[in-house]
Amino acid sequence: MEQRVSLITLGVADLGRARAFYESLGWRGQEVEETVFFQAGGLGFVLWGREELARDSGLADGRGTGFGGITLAHNVRSRQEVDALISAASGAGATVTKPAAATFYGGYAGYFTDPDGHPWEIAHNPGFPLAEDGSLTIPDFGSS
């Protein structure tokens, strides 16, 4: 298996609401067969009905509660961008779960959840510089 992620799919309660939320953040989606696809850098980001995604995944239902074991991250180039994006998300209907603050690694980050409770970290990490196209390369941490 190649070391990459091709798609991230979120199971959502209301596809129209979820699409409107992400589009209010400036993303542009394409709806195909009750699924919304967004190009997100070098990977695809997908919204699909939670129950449909659960069935497709072979799970009994999609009604889990609490933390689902996944956090999405969006790295930016400055602390100001962190604040601006968290503010924009809040204005679009997100719930800020952790206001932006200095981090233990010398960066700056905060969290919000989208209308379906999927957590997003918005982070500025000077140790993970972004290329001009927004791609991130994990630095060489040396042998562990």
Image (cartoon, grey):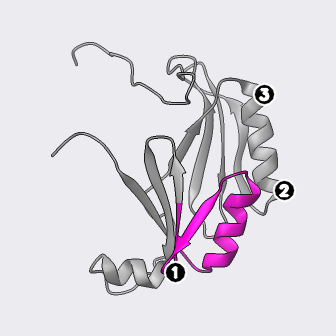
- Neighbor class of circle 2 (other Cα within 10 Å; few <14, some 14-19, many 20+) is few
Q: Tag 2, which secondary structure?
A: helix
For disc 2, the marked residue is 91
Which amino acid is tagged 3? Answer: Gln
Precedes in sequence: disc 2 or disc 1: 1
Q: Which residue is drawn at the image coordinates 47% and 28% (left, top)?
A: 136
For disc 3, the marked residue is 80
Q: Indicate the position of residue 62 as horizontal and vertical percent values.
A: 43, 81
Q: Tag 1, which secondary structure?
A: loop
Q: Which residues are magenta?
A: 11-37
Front position among marks 2 and 1? 1
Above or below residue 58? Residue 76 is above
Which amino acid is tagged 2? Answer: Gly
Q: Indicate the position of residue 45 as horizontal and vertical percent values.
A: 49, 56
Mark 2 → mark 1, Cα distance in angstroms: 26 Å
Is any part of residue 50 visible from this angle?
A: yes
Q: Which residue is drawn at the image coordinates 65% and 34% (left, top)?
A: 109
Residue 25 on the magenta span = yes
> Which residue is more in the foreground, 144 or 73?
73
Precedes in sequence: disc 2 or disc 3: 3
Q: Is residue 18 left or right of residue 53?
A: right
- Find the residue positioned furthest to the right: 91
Q: Which mark is residue 34?
A: 1
- Quadrant of the image occupied by residue 59: bottom left
Q: Indicate the position of residue 42 as horizontal and vertical percent values.
A: 44, 41
Q: Quadrant of the C terminus?
A: top left
Q: Which mark is residue 15?
A: none
